[in-house]
Image (spheres, helix red, strand yellow):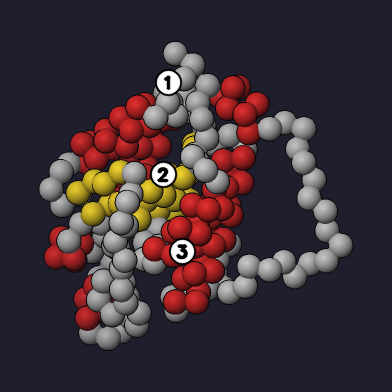
Amino acid sequence: MTDSVKSKNITWHHASITKDDRERLNGHRAVVLWFTGLSGSGKSTLAHAVEVALFEMGCRTYVLDGDNIRHGLNKDLGFSPEDREENIRRIGEVAHLFVEAGVIAMTAFISPYRADRDKARQIAGDGNFIEVYVKCNVETCEKRDVKGLYQKARAGLIPEFTGISAPYEEPLRPEIVVDTAAEPLETSAQKVLTYLREQGIIGIAD
């Protein structure tokens, strides 16, 4: 996929209301919380649990979920390495727009390749991207697999399935690591919330 812009004769228009303005109004910073991990690791479950807690605090939030996005924005993409790259690039751009709008944007995507996650971090900008590694071994993910995806992948019915027939590159320096095979959901969610407080992302209006 190319990074060049095909459209010509276009001009970037600067907004009158800035991200800083929106953050002051909201009483919290706007960032991307990028949940990454194997299918069945608990990314979506954790992202929504964190969102509920933040919403109850009065924060403006939104979860971009992998399956949901593929029903609309990215319905033209499959699971080849090239399509996965484009999938994550688009999500990185959308998440960036949410951050510019003052929202804490949470993304729940396998996003198996480090280079793609690094690109999403670059799109978000300095200090706006928090990588959350939802660590979970394949055996536990398979036990949780109510969709039967792992079984189909092992039978060869789903090609290029991450963790079975396609690679997953673990984050090297994630801001947050949770082990959903070893700790309850509440503990994982609290780790994320504690980090946000410690970094001054939430609680700045208290």
Mark 2 secondary-structure assignment: strand
> To which quarter of the image does residue 165 belong?
bottom left
- Residue 190 lies, with reference to residue 10, above or below; the image says above
- Is residue 72 in view from this perspective? no
Instruction: Mark 2 or mark 3: name the one nearer the start of the chain.
Output: 3
Residue beneath label 3, please?
A: 116
Residue name at image x 36 percent, y 66 percent:
112
Residue name at image x 57 percent, y 61 percent:
90
Nearer the observer, disc 2 or disc 1?
2
- The disc at residue 181 is none
Residue beneath label 1, please?
A: 203
Nearer the observer, disc 1 or disc 3?
3
- Residue 55 lies, with reference to residue 141, above or below; the image says above
Mark 1 in CB contact with mark 3 (< 8 angstroms): no
Residue name at image x 32 percent, y 57 percent:
171
Neighbours of disc 3 within 10 Å: few (<14), some (14-19), many (20+): some
Q: Residue 70: horizontal and vertical position, in percent? A: 50, 64
| Residue 192 appears left or right of 73 | left
Neighbours of disc 2 within 10 Å: few (<14), some (14-19), many (20+): many
Q: Which kind of residue does numbered mark 3 sit on?
A: Asp
- The disc at residue 130 is 2
Q: Which kind of residue does numbered mark 1 sit on?
A: Gly
Mark 1 secondary-structure assignment: loop
- Residue 8 lies, with reference to residue 34, above or below; the image says below
Neighbours of disc 1 within 10 Å: few (<14), some (14-19), many (20+): some
Q: Which kind of residue does numbered mark 2 sit on?
A: Ile
| Residue 175 appears left or right of 138 | right
Q: Residue furthest bottom?
A: 156
Q: Residue 111: horizontal and vertical position, in percent? A: 40, 62
- Residue 103 lies, with reference to residue 155, above or below; the image says above
State how far apart marks 1 and 3 are (Cα).
Answer: 31 Å
Instruction: Mark 1 or mark 3: name the one nearer the start of the chain.
Output: 3
